[in-house]
Image (cartoon, rainbow, N blue to C red):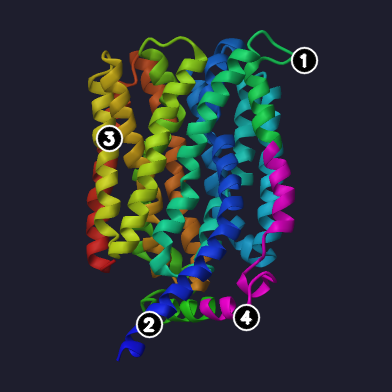
């Protein structure tokens, strides 16, 4: 009796050891790649502190340039992810990283709004397949019941990019403010944060395997564990899941989840693109101080994200682990706006907003990855992600437009808080109906 009871426990411990080794092998490198992916995407928020005065850009020009990135991103999201399945993650991820790293670096040569718009548009197109591609890639390595913590580990690169990138960007702007080597501080920032992405792209070609079947570093036992868990996931995939890309586009659940993701990202991008400016408007003038203050929300968000991801897996509960962080994001934005004249409370509000909004991202993705079959996932995940990234265009543009029109970001941030609340309501409805 004791022997039969001990067998399942030993088997579970053996599986844990297998996935721990795979996590240590895959996640650190992918984490660093995503860190620079996000840093290259949002570092215009810090460049803005010098770039607008140097180039005589208005707030609306900045908002449009920051947001137009996502037009290219949305247009190329689905085809890029399909190309990843055609050419393999190793080759396609390497190509995407080299391309967007080069384009992001070239932002240092911007002199006109047109240059700014074009480079941001093409950078977005180059990046489009990276995130949904990595989500698809990880879903092929880790079973559903382990994806909460894995997605949290992977996506903690977002707050860590803010935690490390904010002080680094502030330091670069200050250190190179007088112009060294013929470049201004904001130009040095694009250079020093873009070149590492190109190097990482070259490394991706040699360090990644297309799938676990092609991974020579796996043992036969480890490969058999992955095959068994993937087979279990496949058997539990809802029979209503459509395999063809056309049917994915016709699936109302995909569009509903895309709308939820859009609402989450509305808050995320409002924070990412405007956090430095909001802190500056509180009365802080030194770029390095702004950088350190911007790091506080990201530090706490990184810790909170990992704790919530672990909790979601241990309790096998997705619904409230998604909705509660979303509502935190909305409440935090309202606090930050309502107490803008009291820096300590405003920064507390921004911290709550950052913790909630960013944690909503990894808590969202285990839901659709559990509902899509392997053949439908490439198109379905990319479509959901593309819908979410539309917020990256609309959110910063709306904030910039409202600030130019009213002299304040308050009304825009209130609006975005309302969008997040609406998204949390839809998330409640979808997760109840689908019994996730």
| SS state under label 3 | helix
Residue highlighted by disc 4: 220
Residue 217 versus residue 5 in the image, above or below = above
Mark 4 nearby-residue class (10 Å; few <14, some 14–19, many ≥20): few
User: Between 12 and 135, which is closer to the camera in this rendering?
Assistant: 12
Stretch of the chain drawn in magenta: 196-225
Identify the image quadrant of residue 183.
top right
The residue labelled by disc 2 is 8
**Location of the C terminus (image quadrant):** bottom left
Distance of label 1 from label 4 (alpha carbons):
54 Å
Rendering coords of residue 44 (x, y %): 55, 27
314 relative to 111 in the view: left or right: left
Q: Which residue is mark 3?
A: 417
Locate the N terminus and report the quarter of the image it occupies. bottom left
Q: Which residue is mark 1?
A: 181
**248 is within the stretch colored magenta:** no
On the image, the x and y values in percent for residue 31 come to 55, 48
Of badges 4 and 2, nearer the viewer stands 2
Tag 1, which secondary structure? loop
Residue drawn at x 67%, y 60% is 208
Q: CA distance from mark 3 to mark 4?
A: 50 Å
Tag nearer the camera, 1 or 4: 4
**Structural distance between the alpha carbons of marks 3 and 1:** 43 Å
Label 1, residues with CA under 10 Å away: few <14, some 14-19, many ≥20: few
Residue 412 image position (x, y, % from top left): 32, 27
28 relative to 272, above or below: below
């Amino acid at each position: 009796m004791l022997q039969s009871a001990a067998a399942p426990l030993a088997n579970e411990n053996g599986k844990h050891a297998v996935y721990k080794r795979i996590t240590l092998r895959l996640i650190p490198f992918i984490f660093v790649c995503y860190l620079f992916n996000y840093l290259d995407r949002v570092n215009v928020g810090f460049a803005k502190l010098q770039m607008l005065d140097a180039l005589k850009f208005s707030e609306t020009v900045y908002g449009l340039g920051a947001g137009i990135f996502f037009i290219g991103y949305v247009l190329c999201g689905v085809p890029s992810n399909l190309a990843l399945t055609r050419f393999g993650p190793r080759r396609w991820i390497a190509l995407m990283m080299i391309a967007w790293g080069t384009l992001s670096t070239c932002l240092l040569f911007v002199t006109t709004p047109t240059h700014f718009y074009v480079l941001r548009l093409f950078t977005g197109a180059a990046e489009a397949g990276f995130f949904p591609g990595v989500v698809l890639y990880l879903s092929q390595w880790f079973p559903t019941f382990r994806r909460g913590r894995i997605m949290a580990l992977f996506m903690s690169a977002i707050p860590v990019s803010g935690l490390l990138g904010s002080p680094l960007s502030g330091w670069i702007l200050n250190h190179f403010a007088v112009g060294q080597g013929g470049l201004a501080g904001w130009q040095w920032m694009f250079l020093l944060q873009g070149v590492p992405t190109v190097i990482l792209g070259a490394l991706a070609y040699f360090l990644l395997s297309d799938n676990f079947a092609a991974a020579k570093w796996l043992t036969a036992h480890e490969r058999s564990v992955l095959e068994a868990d993937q087979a279990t996931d496949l058997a539990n995939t809802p029979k209503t899941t459509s395999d063809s890309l056309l049917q994915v586009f016709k699936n109302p659940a995909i569009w509903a989840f895309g709308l939820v993701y859009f609402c989450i990202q509305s808050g995320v991008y409002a924070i990412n693109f405007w956090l430095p400016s909001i802190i500056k408007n509180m009365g802080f003038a030194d770029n390095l101080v702004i950088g350190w203050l911007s790091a506080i929300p990201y530090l706490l968000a990184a810790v909170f994200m990992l704790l919530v991801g672990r909790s979601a897996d241990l309790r096998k509960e997705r619904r409230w682990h998604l909705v509660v962080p979303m509502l935190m994001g909305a409440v935090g934005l309202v606090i930050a706006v309502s107490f803008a004249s009291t820096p300590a409370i405003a920064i507390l509000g921004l911290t709550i907003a950052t913790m909630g909004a960013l944690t909503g991202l990894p808590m969202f993705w285990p839901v659709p990855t559990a509902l899509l079959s392997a053949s439908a996932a490439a198109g379905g995940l990319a479509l959901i992600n593309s819908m979410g990234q539309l917020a990256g265009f609309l959110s910063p543009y709306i904030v910039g437009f409202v600030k130019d029109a009213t002299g304040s970001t308050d009304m825009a941030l209130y609006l975005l808080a309302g969008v997040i609340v609406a998204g949390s309501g839809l998330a409640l409805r979808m997760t109840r109906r689908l019994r996730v």
